[in-house]
Image: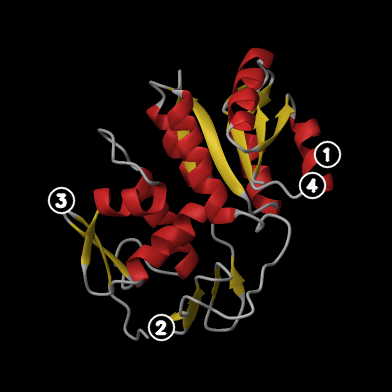
Amino acid sequence: MLSVAIVDDEADIRDLVCGYLGRHGFETFSIATERELDRLLAERNIDTVLLDVNLGNEDGFAIARRLRARWNGGLLMLTGRADTVDRVVGLEIGADDYVTKPFDLRELLARVRSVSRRYSGAAGKESIPAKSKKPTIVFDGFRLDPERRELRDPGGEAIELTTGEFDLLHALAEHPGRVRNRDQLLRQTHNRDAAPFDRTIDVQIGRLRKKLGDDGKAPKLIKAVRGIGYIFTPAKHS
């Protein structure tokens, strides 16, 4: 059973979301404060956290930033409909996706399922398959393992990626030398179409470049194709 923590200071919203997700097969946890969230994550392996940006007297962005420094599960941010800046900031911090308020429960379910399934079991333990079904992709000394969902640098050190970042890199690395437009990448990594002024892919590309040491001003691995999308151009790929 996939697990999700709903972190919101409004009890009515927590009850609504917990009840709906619970009826659709999720194990849900109703959380009102960061302290309660810390206690839960110390005791349980939680697949996904749904975190409200405006958490009463607590700053949801600050909580997300601290969370990302020590925890690597799925993270969705709840934001106001008009707060485009909130969405961008959340993605830059390391959120995998965002849901706007007021939200449709069916859309929320689809977003939570998408992130949770990609990250199921990875938050608190390492999963090692007996036999790899998807081949490891090697490029410029990096090793991208789809089964273990891990990326290692040329020196063998693991590079921490969010679910969205990992899936985006995998989507690009599977098709080197081919231009992928933003809608294709968004559908493949987040199971949704782009909304007007949606910067999800652009923000995650920026984070990926930093983690890969790819200069954003003169990138060599992930290049932008103006007006279309991005292309993966490693020197060596296998």
Nearer to us in this view, 230 or 45:
45
Q: How is the image coloured?
A: secondary structure
Residue 79: where, in percent of width, then height? Answer: 49, 26
Nearer to us in this view, 196 or 2:
2
The amino acid type of the residue labelled 2 equals: Asp
- Mark closest to the chain's N terminus, 3 or 1: 1
Reading the image, the residue beneath label 4 is 44
The amino acid type of the residue labelled 1 equals: Arg
Relative to 166, say whether 96 is above or below: above
Residue 19: where, in percent of width, then height? Answer: 64, 23
Q: CA distance from mark 2 to mark 1?
A: 41 Å
Reading the image, the residue beneath label 3 is 227
Q: Are marks 3 and 4 in contact (CB under 8 Å)?
A: no
- Mark closest to the chain's N terminus, 2 or 3: 2
Helix, strand or loop under label 3: loop
- Mark closest to the chain's N terminus, 4 or 2: 4
Q: CA distance from mark 4 to mark 2?
A: 37 Å
The residue positioned 45% from the left and 18% from the top of the image is: 102
Reading the image, the residue beneath label 2 is 140
Quadrant in the picture for residue 176: bottom left
* Disc 1 packing (10 Å; few <14; some 14–19; many ≥20): few
Q: Are marks 2 and 3 in contact (CB under 8 Å)?
A: no
